[in-house]
Amino acid sequence: MLVAVYRSRTSVPKIRPLAGLEAIEEAVGRATEMGKPVLFTPGYGDVAGTNAAPTIAGLDMLGYVGRLAARRDTKMAVTVGHPNTYAVALDVLRSAYMVEGRPDALGDDAVTFGSEIQFAFTAHTLGRIQREKPATCLFLGYFAAEAIIVAEAAVAAGSISIAGATNHFQLPFFVAACDYTLIGEEFLAAGAYVSNDPRRIGSIQGQDWVKAIAVALAVIGVIMQVFGNKSMATWLGK
Amino acid sequence: MKRELPVFLTAITGLILLADYYFNIPALKPYASAMQNWGVIIAAFTLALAAANLIKIHTLRVSRGGRIGTVLPSLVLLTGLFVTIFSGIFLGRSSPSFSFIFNNMYTPLAAAFYAMTAFHLASASYRAFRARSAQAAVLLITGVLLMLGRAPIGETIWSRFPKIADWIMGVGNLAGSRGIMISIAVGVIGVSMRVLTGIDRAHLGAE
Amino acid sequence: MSIVERLGRIDNRIIYTVLIIVLIWPLANPLGLPVSVGANTRRTYEAIDALESGNVVLFWAGYSASGAGDVQPQAVAIARHLFQQGVKIIFLSDVVEGPMLVENVITNIPEITSQTYGVDWVNLGYLAGGENGISAAAKGLKEAYPLDFRGNPTESLALLANIETAGDVDMTVFFTTQNSDMYVRQVYPYGKPLIGGLINTIVPQAEPYVNSGQLTGILAGLRGGAEYELLMKQPSLGLAAMDAQSIGHLLFILLIGMANLAYFAQRNRLARKVGE
């Protein structure tokens, strides 16, 4: 990965287009035309700990969506489930509006902190969806069992919904209920994709190389196992 | 310096903890343990921060007044918060009042919310599980076989349903799960590496 | 629009009402459908049955109150089994409501009256930090928990006298509504058997670990708890809910069937229209 980041200084790799990402810009446009807000939530994860990766990826996307919303004068409604994430989300959104020259357009209640408790946060998000009836709901971050609840609430409110999560046992719920879903690594790469930062895009290429190595090791291990040699499995199991 | 110092601290902490996890270096163990204990203490304080944040937001909402629909939920929240804190701290966590609040108010409310997933799942399945294409039809049939295999009534209808469900979970689902888990794990390593090396600074707020 | 097509446009409120009735009715009028025991539950039962009197187990209550309906029957069944085996239990938690849920588990166990706190079992309480907390506790139990949930210094508890790390116990059992990865990453390296009681939705994530041997066994949701109660020959809440689960699943299948009938009827009607 470090090699890929280093190489990106001179040659930036191309990432294939992601349907969910391209739909985000259209979805924000839909909200602008309908005069309704965009609801965004990075889930109830923290920026530190086990759930940090999807939460940080979600905050990356918040910056991108914030800039789109500021450009089009579309109201943002952001719900978060951790005080650390609340502070960072507020900062990211303020900065996005500042970059677009619209610092005054961000409302006081744009970012709200519900609770650290999973279903209290879910109730908070549901409340905002049902009261504010957003045209677009973006669920990009860390979600657990509340995934289907918030996704269905978006459907009931008539919103277009785009989800991105790394909890692969919640992905089927998002796929069933949302219009677009960024699955696993696509979501983690999305932040790099929209940032246009060569180093971050380079690290995505590095991830692909690591995956290729993992697949190669798996295939070699299977062949060895078929012929009775368990040394690969033993070595990886240590 | 405002952004460089946190990046430096993140990198050092991450490297020490990673080295302690993967290698047995006795000299690093006290530092790694100390950092983990600091992490536990900081996490405990974020709970207090969460409570303080909630009190601040909802007190402001109540003090600003307005429609009863806006003020009442905040009042209910603040009342519940202070009553629970008071009974837990001053009367004790084993006291009848705290136990009553936990067992008869908090737990049923939390369980009710989780139970909503069943209803939303019903409406999502009804809306989404239609055989629009060959892949959707395969998903549909697999889902039905799995439901019949996992519920006791399925076994009553035909004894082979559980075996079919076990095969779907143990072979088909497992293969797909492993692939997604590996790619997600690699993605998480990528994000972590970017955070540790300071390439990703989203967690520090905006540039 | 034909009647068949209307089957695909049932209001959500009707679906929810029927679901409520269908779930409540078998709880009030049990059908007594037979429940078989799966391989995962059997493996878990045998692992715990192999423990000897005097062994010590770490019992990680990492499930929230919201998931207690799914996971608590498993926790109660396994705790009863452990006490019946004469095994000593160290209860701890990585979620805020964990210690209270442990107290709920304890009150549901008749065997607790013959157990001495501090000697046969302890409740260490909640440790903040999620996976970091799990790691800290596994690395140094008494360092991470200077006091237990009841305010006693952990150094004074007889049960913890020779327990420093997760490697000093004979088994770790965890119950979670979040994910099993954390426990596999932080506790499995200590080399002792690891068993997971999981909410249904995260079972597919844990199965690779069972396959690789990192998890000795898992219990899957409410059904896992029911199967364990069956093996223990001590029916309780888990088994009581199985009929409701069965009928609920049948309703789901019926709804999906109706939706697809309506879909194909509509598709055929539109195809005929285009043909005309």
Image: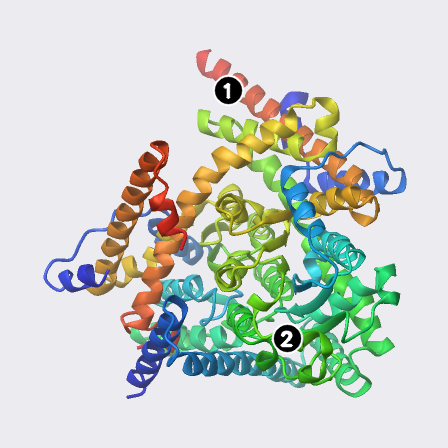
In this picture, is A115 found above or below B33?
above
Q: Disc 2 on helix, strand or loop?
A: loop
Query: Is C260 situated above or below C162?
Result: above
Q: Which amino acid does label 2 sit on?
A: Asn
* Residue C69 versus residue B102 in the image, above or below: above
Horizontal arrangement in the rendering, residue C29 relative to residue A132 (left or right): right
Along the line of sight, the residue nearer the viewer: A142 or B73:
A142
What number is the disc on residue A127? none
Q: Position of residue B4 (x, y in %)?
A: 28, 83
Res C173 quadrant in image: bottom right
Residue C162 got which mark?
2
Name of the residue lying farthest toward the top: C276
Is residue C213 shown left or right of residue C232?
left
Marks 1 and 2 close (CB-CB < 8 Å): no
Q: Residue furthest left?
A: A10
Task: State the mark number for residue C270.
Answer: 1
Report which quarter residue C75 is drawn in. bottom right
Q: Mark 1 is on which residue type?
A: Leu
Q: Mark 1 and mark 2: span between their CA atoms? A: 75 Å
Residue C120 position, x and y percent, is: 77, 69
Residues at discs 1 and 2 both on one chain: yes
